[in-house]
Structure formats: C-alpha cells, structure tokens
Image (tube, rainbow, N blue to C red):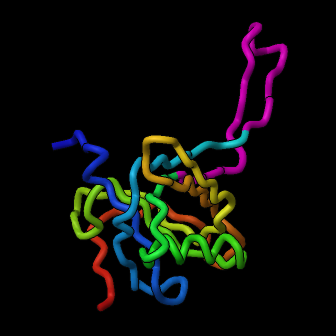
Amino acid sequence: MAIRLGLDARLYRNTGNPGSLLFELVENVRDLTLNLETGEADVTTRGNAGWRASLGTLKDASIEFEMVWNSEDVDFVVFKDAFFAGDPIELLVMDGEASSPESQGLQALCQIISFTRSEALEEAITVSVTAKPTYSGTPPAWVLGPIEFDA
C-alpha cells in the first residue's frame, strides 16, 4: 500500500559513532515533522514573457518533534544533554520500519537547535525539539529500506 500513516513512521538515533549502524528506535515521540526545502536563485530574464524563473540552490532540512518531559527516559536525556553540550546526534527519520523495503527517509548528523518546554495546564509537560544537519564529513542522505542495524 502506498499510503503511509504517521503512527507507523519512525525516528531512530545512532547510539554508536556517526556512520555506524547502531540505531535504536526513539519511542518517546509524539508529532514529528520532517521539513525539506531548497533555497532559490532568481534567474528571471526579459525572455521569460513576464514570468519569474527560479533555480534551486542549497537544500535545507529540519526535524521537529515533541517528546513527553520524562527525566527517566534515556532518549529524552540524550536529546537534552546534546542540546546543552552542543554535541551532534545522528538521526534517521523513516516513514515506516527501517527494515522494510518500502520505507524511506532522511539520515543526517544533526545538532539540536531548539529544546523548548511547554507546560499546558491540563497536559503533561512536553518538549519541542528541533534538529538540523550539522557539519560532517558525510552529508545528509535520502535512504531507502531495508536498513539492517548492527547488533
């Protein structure tokens, strides 16, 4: 089936060195948004008959998700510590199980750019996390399943 449900999507984080396949599922995730955009260069000329013309330039990505504030959750602590220490985390955002041949998504070494706590009166405290690709010898890549992780 070509239609994918958000509840079947997965966020994984690399628990080993960047580039290894030691990814583990991050379960404390609510809504997640993978933003993919490209910059643009204006290449409009008079020959375009009054139409603007653009060319894509640099790609941009951000991974935004919400977690329940749980100081005993290992993933929560890793993301919090990465934010405060400025340490990168390798993330894999897939539209299904990584081991499925139908799954696809973005793999990138990321910096936690935002770690915003929300304290709604009648809800659990949550944190909104934003991760963006950071400087790395391996650029972000769109990957296709199946991906087999190391044990």
| Side (left or right) of 129 relative to 39 | left
Q: Residue 50, relative to residue 54: is it above or below?
A: above
Of residues 35 and 68, the one nearer the viewer is 68
Q: Is residue 57 magenta?
A: yes
The residue at 22%/63% (across/down) is 101
Q: Quadrant of residue 18?
A: bottom right
| Side (left or right) of 107 relative to 26 | right
Residue 16 placed where, x, y %?
48, 89
| Side (left or right) of 133 relative to 33 | right
Residue 81 placed where, x, y %?
62, 77
Q: Residue 99, relative to residue 62: is it above or below?
A: below
Is the N terminus in the top left, top right, bottom left or bottom right quadrant? top left
Residue 67 placed where, x, y %?
46, 58
Of residues 81 and 54, the one nearer the viewer is 81
Q: Quadrant of residue 94?
A: bottom left
Give the magenta range. Answer: 40-64
The residue at 53%/77% (across/down) is 78
Residue 92 placed where, x, y %?
44, 66
The residue at 75%/15% (across/down) is 48
Of residues 92 and 26, the one nearer the viewer is 26
Q: Residue furthest left?
A: 1
Q: Is residue 54 magenta?
A: yes
Q: Quadrant of residue 38?
A: top right
Of residues 71 and 91, the one nearer the viewer is 71
